[in-house]
Amino acid sequence: MAMAVTAERHNTIADAQCPASRVARVQVFHDLDSVEQVWRQFETSGQLLTPFQRFDFLATWQKHVGTADHVAPFVIAGYDADRHPLLLLPLAARMEHGVRVARFLGGKHATFNMPIYRRDFATAATVSDLEALLSGVRAQRQSVDVLALERQPERWLGITNPLSLLRSQKSTNDCPLMPIAPGAPPASLISNSFRRRLKSKERKLQALPGYRYVRAGSEAEIRRILDAFFVIKPARMAAQKLPNVFADPGIEDFIREACLTPLPGGSHVIDIHALECDDEAIAIFAGVADGHRFSMMFNTYTMSDNARHSPGLILVRSIVDYYAGQGYTSLDLGIGSDSYKQLFCKESEPIFDSFLPLSTRGHLAAACMSALGHAKRAVKQTPALARAVQTLRGMAR
């Protein structure tokens, strides 16, 4: 009851004005504590969300990264006429070039972004429902000029993302995807010839004292592997003449807390997989899992001579085998066209962006964001342009 009172005091409510819509009320929450109870109601098997939209993932991100980046929660909730929640849009707002913009919480650390839907609403949502939601947001006392909703999957768990009904465009990159059929034999996921090559390379690593594959479960394992990651990754990025993005304010604290936060069933908000020996961490991959999909977030591998034996590829093979054995239906290695991803993921998942104006200023901002998105995709899809951009970035660094 106290939480409900807090929500009424700190957050604004507007009645939706579209009679054909099931969205009858819209509420915007400006702090995560007041929306936590509603949010966690959505985190059941009967609802539709990606693991990147879990409350624990995004609340931890906001605590360490969002606050340091000066973004404020702007979480939109849509309710039916009986005041039952239909969806949550977990956003954060800030001023950008004189325009107030709301983007998904999680920033670049969330591979996929999507509203959290009540499943029956998601399967039957209409344009009228979504227009009513936007109308309710416009009516807020503290609204925004534009919703910049990037990196959205067109479908999740076989259900179409309703936001794809509104104006949208292809994202800069699609996501390489590995579907996993129930009971699929290993050869159907990774070919026998590729497995043999990896096995040959792994024999060199198996000679190392204490060589093992680890899915980190205990606090000691998690801390040990993360300590290694935050030594190896900056060194590897420096060797590639890349900036150390993990040194940005709050990021290391976010990752450490998320990796240590347990979930029901033995997982963590972020799960860590590694190849280790007694002397070092050889390869590290981390991501999120929800019982259906494992999605990679970040990775690295040793700077030692053991890197010659493709430990990253060997670890991905182990991860594929692990989640296939757990009955998962898909796996991805993150959005992007890196060559190693294509070795495992033979399909491509469409990803889209939506830039939705809510004010007069927002129309111009949305048009500029859309044009920039089209330009980025054109560069990515044109090898010559992509090489030119990489060259210019290298010169700038």
Image: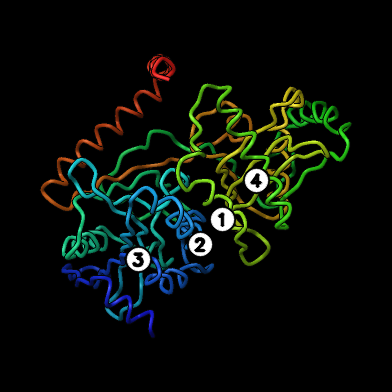
Left or right of 358? Residue 304 is: right
Question: The C terminus is located in which quarter?
Answer: top left
Label 2 vs 4, first from the N-terminus: 2
Gap in angstroms between the C-alphas marked 4 and 3: 30 Å
Label 3 vs 1, first from the N-terminus: 3
Gap in angstroms between the C-alphas marked 1 and 4: 11 Å
Which residue is identified by label 1?
Answer: 258
Which residue is identified by label 4?
Answer: 226
Q: Nearer the viewer, mark 2 or mark 3?
A: 3
Left or right of 42? Residue 271 is: right
Gap in angstroms between the C-alphas marked 3 and 1: 19 Å
Label 2 vs 1, first from the N-terminus: 2
Q: Residue 88, position in %: x, y?
A: 36, 64
Query: Looking at the picture, does residue 211 appear above or below residue 131?
Result: above
Q: Are marks 3 and 1 in contact (CB under 8 Å)?
A: no
Q: Nearer the viewer, mark 2 or mark 4?
A: 4
Which residue is identified by label 2?
Answer: 56
Query: Looking at the picture, does residue 372 appear above or below residue 68?
Result: above
Query: Image quarter for residue 81?
Result: bottom left
Label 2 vs 3, first from the N-terminus: 3
Q: Is mark 2 on a helix, strand or loop?
A: helix
Q: Are marks 2 and 1 in contact (CB under 8 Å)?
A: yes
Count residues near mark 2 (Cα–Cα under 10 Å), then give few for <14, some for 14-19, many for 20+.
many
